């Protein structure tokens, strides 16, 4: 009954209510945060504007380190948006986790493989589009035949493994962090001593998970940029 209540069907597809709420919440947090930081833009920036400009410069640096030319400038907003969403999504479950009658309504969206694999698929689709725009259809698909024609199956398999590793790396790190945090919280029911121990462990692990969540956002955007850059060049 709990599982049925957590899903609904639309146009023949089954959707998880908890995932949709968590994704929407993360997106709203990013929107509100960026709006608040950019509300009063001036030539002499204040603290809020400085934070926003630092974040933009940071993500632009990630993109520029892998992608050169005009493309890096056009992808600046993509890198910033992707980084902000992933970092908020990674940290959301640490500070807000809502379970009602065994159904999870709010968690970290990136602790679900469907979400992380969707993000990976967006990156791969964008890379294919930019590769075709940069090299043309012939030049783009010729890269799959290099260095020899019979390497085509290997190159296609590499595309599939890139897709899997990009999405599953993010999912595995966030899910394992939330699972361990749940185990630590469960220790608090073992008495006063265990409550104190679990409280200390929870603080330590939460701090470490914040660090991991930030690192994973950086890694995802970096690897996505590297993957896109490879599609913009003709291989030897």
Image: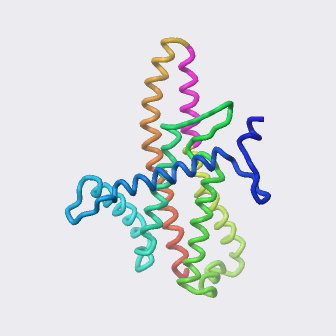
Residue at position x 63%, y 83% in the image: 142
Quadrant where the C terminus sits is: bottom right
Which residue is at 63% across, 62% downward? Answer: 163
Residue at the limit of the structure toward the top, as seen here: 192
Q: Is residue 154 magenta?
A: no
Report x, y in % for residue 67: 44, 73
Q: Quadrant of residue 160?
A: bottom right
Given residues 2 and 77, the one toward you in this image is: 2
| Foreground pick, 229 / 45 | 45
Q: Residue at x 58, y 35 (%)?
A: 98
Q: As displayed, is residue 76 above or below residue 181? A: below
Magenta residues span: 175-190
Left or right, residue 104 beside residue 84: right
Count of numbered marks = 0
Quadrant in which the N terminus is drawn: top right
Task: Name the chief secondary structure element in magenta.
Answer: helix
């Amino acid at each position: 009954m709990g599982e049925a209540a957590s899903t609904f069907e639309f146009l023949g597809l089954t959707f998880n209510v908890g995932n949709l709420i968590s994704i929407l919440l993360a997106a709203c947090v990013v929107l509100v945060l960026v709006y608040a930081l950019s509300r009063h833009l001036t030539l002499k920036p204040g603290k809020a504007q400085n934070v926003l400009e630092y974040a933009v410069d940071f993500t632009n640096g990630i993109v520029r380190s892998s992608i050169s030319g005009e493309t890096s400038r056009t992808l600046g907003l993509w890198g910033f948006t992707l980084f902000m969403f992933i970092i908020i999504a990674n940290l959301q479950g640490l500070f807000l986790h809502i379970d009602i009658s065994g159904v999870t309504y709010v968690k970290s969206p990136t602790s679900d493989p469907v979400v992380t694999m969707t993000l990976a698929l967006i990156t791969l689709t964008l890379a294919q589009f930019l590769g075709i725009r940069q090299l043309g259809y012939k030049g783009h698909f010729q890269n799959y035949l290099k260095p020899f024609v019979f390497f085509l199956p290997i190159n296609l398999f590499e595309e599939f493994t890139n897709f899997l590793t990009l999405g599953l790396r993010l999912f595995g790190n966030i899910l394992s962090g939330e699972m361990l945090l749940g185990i630590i919280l469960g220790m608090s029911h073992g008495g006063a001593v265990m409550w104190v121990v679990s409280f200390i462990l929870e603080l330590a692990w939460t701090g470490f998970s914040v660090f991991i969540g930030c690192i994973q956002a950086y890694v995802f955007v970096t690897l996505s940029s590297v993957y896109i850059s490879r599609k913009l060049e003709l291989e030897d």
